[in-house]
Image (cartoon, rainbow, N blue to C red):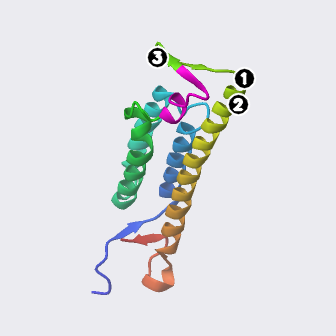
Amino acid sequence: MKNSKKIVVLNETIRNTMEEILSLMLDCVSLDNIENEEVIVENLDLIYEMMEDLPRPLSLITDSLIERIFFPIIDDEDYFDFIHKNEELGKMVDGVFVVKDEAAIWKLGQLFYERCELLERVITDFGSGIIAMMEAVTVTKEEDGLSNCWKL
């Protein structure tokens, strides 16, 4: 037996699916959507549906990233405390964050931008790593008589 490792066909469909998943993730952490739980949950539903078409290892790795990035945004009531508990920016009044002044508005925007940028960088780095890994383990016809395959 030449190689007992499982071979998963790595085709454009898998790569495209992964790129669509990453695009939806980036949409979730955009400035427009980071606080919009409805959009995030809707996108995660689509992502989980698409993950069914991925090889199990990719699906597991992607799920791990989702748990680390998106579950806290959705489930942790204190996730945005870096804003809401910053007395220099304003205070919570009846469940609504009231901004102190114009300078605080600019600082608030900056903090949100920095958080979104950080999450975008994590997702982009994750995606680049996954794509690079997929390409690195792809074998050629000359090596195993198979083209466009991923050894697991």
Tell whether 1 sits left or right of 152.
Answer: left
Residue indicated by mark 2: 106
Instruction: State the quadrant of the N terminus.
Output: bottom left
Q: Is 86 within the magenta?
A: yes
Residue at image coords 51%, 57%? 126
Q: CA distance from mark 3 to mark 2?
A: 21 Å
Can see residue 53? no
Q: Residue at x 52, y 36 (%)?
A: 82
Hey, which quadrant is residue 46 in on the image?
top left
Vertical placement of residue 14 versus 4, above or below: above
In the image: residue 15, left or right of residue 74: right
Residue matched to label 1 = 102
Residue 88, image x, y percentages: 61, 29
Tell which circle, 3 or 2, labels the residue nearer the N-terminal end: 3
73 vs 102, left or right, is left
Give the image location of residue 12, x and y in percent: 53, 59
Q: Mark 3 = which residue?
A: 95
Mark 2 and 1 residues: CB-CB less than 8 Å, in contact?
A: yes
- Residue 65 position, x and y percent, is 42, 51
Pick whichever, 62 or 19, lies toward us: 62
Q: What residue type is disc 3 on? A: Gly
What's the residue type where badge 2 is placed?
Answer: Trp
From which residue to which does the magenta span run?
A: 80-91
Q: Which residue is nearer to you in this view: 61 or 18?
A: 61
- Amino acid at circle 1: Glu
Check contact, mark 3 vs mark 1: CB within 8 A: no
List x then y, in percent, for residue 110: 67, 37
